[in-house]
Amino acid sequence: MSETVENVRATAAAEALSEPLTIPVAAYLSEEYARAERDKLWRKVWQQVGRVEEIPAVGDFLTYEILDDSLLIVRTAPDRIRAYYNVCSHRGRRLVDTPSGARDARGRGRRFVCGFHGWQYDLEGHCTHVPERADWQGCLTDERTGLKQVQVDTWGGWIFINMDPECEPLRDYLEPAATLLAPFQLERFRYRWRRWLVFDCNWKVALEAFNETYHVPYTHPEFIPFGSFLGWSRVQGRHSNIGFEAPKGLEENQGKLRIGGGVDARVSTAEMQNFIWENANTNTTETLVEVANRLVTELPEGTPPDQVAKYWLETARREDAERGVIWPTVAPEAVAESGTAWQIFPNFQIGHGQNNMLCYSARPYGYDPDKCVFEVAVYQLYPPGEEPETEWVHTPQDDPDWRTVLPQDFSNMAAVQQGMKTRGFSGPKPNPYRERATVNLHHNLAKYMGTGEPRKLT
Ligand code: FES
Ligand SMILES: [Fe+2]
């Protein structure tokens, strides 16, 4: 192991939650815990519900469901988004129905009409029509009939909601992620594809399959020839981040756009890029793959890895710029410090890069602790006007459209959920250096839930 990596590990060991800890399994398995999450967690935290560009015009709306709460997120003005509880104030019928089998409801309109007795609401949430209103003898005040608002704000191009009227502002909640990710200009990214499915595991098990690098050589052995994909994991307040280890002089390689290891970085970078493009369709772009494939002809044999990295990224950046795709300029230290992915408490992971991004979300599927809704979205920068039209595609676990890499991760989910239930299991023991994001998730969950604090492994 290089001296740099040893130094990083030594520093990391002095940081918060760096001692060996174990997590009580109730957070994953207990029905009581799963029920308590509704009031103690989901009704208190900021949750990512979609992208700003998904509701571009006034009257565009989408819904978001989390346990018993359905929310209606509406663009009410060119520069304003509002969120309401999706319920009619008359007798409580859900106002906008989610089509059966769909992830959410989407549409555009100037008013919402309840299908039961025809009460109507405008975009501002006022109840504008009640059939036979006079029968209520003046008691149907705006206060009693209007749609109830929930907090909504945007950051990085995402819409976030919070059902707690007393919640702290979104920007404060997101720190230090918001500041450290700012140079990446995530609001400029657009979906390339997005898929969702239901897993037979708790939402935490699903997220914890992606918030660490410790599994890579074993779950994804095909990556071994391309170099080491092991990395660090850091506590960042209520959030965490992860990044790759990188030798001195190649600190930028802690980020997403990294070159391959091995004797010839030109060759291994191209092989790695082709493998990822074909088998994951994540974490890279066509431009990066094309330029990687030319490294062997455009650079002399023996070009040092740092020079290969520089040439590859500068060429891809220039060629993208020529077609109107302008990468943000991020200082190498900022790339290194921000790593490859942020775990935004409690259930959103942003795998950022300078021209592409891979994000995961997970949330409960009803009160069954053994099930969750999982979402995967790949984003990139596009020439203006050439952004693809995408929608959430329900894609079961065995669908070949997932290709080969993600199903390797998926194969661990239900197996972990089931394995944790056996009497012979003494509790998860995350790697204190590489899997600290998991420990930090439970450390912060415990603050909301009042139970489940990670304990010393002694
Ligand atoms: S429940 Fe909506 S109009 Fe009656
Ligand atoms: Fe993985």
Image: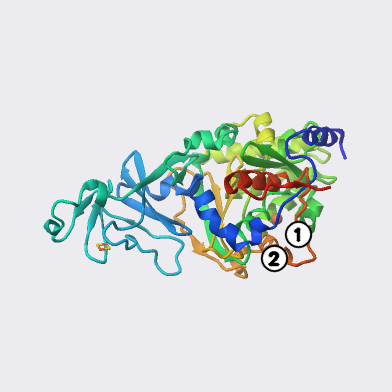
Residue 437: quadrant of the picture: top right
Q: Is mark 2 within 8 Å of ligand 2?
A: no
Residue ID at (48%, 36%) = 168
Percent across and percent down for residue 431 are 78, 48
Task: Give x and y (percent) for residue 280.
Answer: 65, 57
Query: Residue, x 49% and y 48% (percent of image)?
Result: 48
Say if 429 sits above or below 329 in the image. Answer: below
Relative to 6, does residue 92 appear above or below in the rendering? below
On the image, the x and y values in percent for residue 343 come to 62, 45
Amino acid identity at mark 1: Thr
The CB of the residue at mark 1 lies under 8 Å from ligand 2: yes
Q: Is residue 48 left or right of residue 310?
A: left
Residue 189 visible in image: yes
Q: Quadrant of the N terminus?
A: top right
Q: Amino acid at mark 2?
A: Ser
* Picture quadrant where residue 389 is located: bottom left
The percent coordinates of residue 125 (x first, y second) are 28, 48
Give the structural element (helix, strand or loop) at label 2: helix
* Label 2 – label 1 distance at C-alpha: 9 Å
Q: Residues within 10 Å of mark 2 (few under 14, many from 20)?
A: some
Seen from the viewer's position, the closer of residues 3 and 433 is 433
Image check: 116 left or right of 458?
left
For disc 2, the marked residue is 411
Residue beneath the point at 35% across and 49% down: 74
Verify CB contact (< 8 Å) between mark 2 and mark 1: yes
Instruction: Please name the residue that numbered disc 1 is placed on.
Output: 219
**Label drawn at residue 430:** none
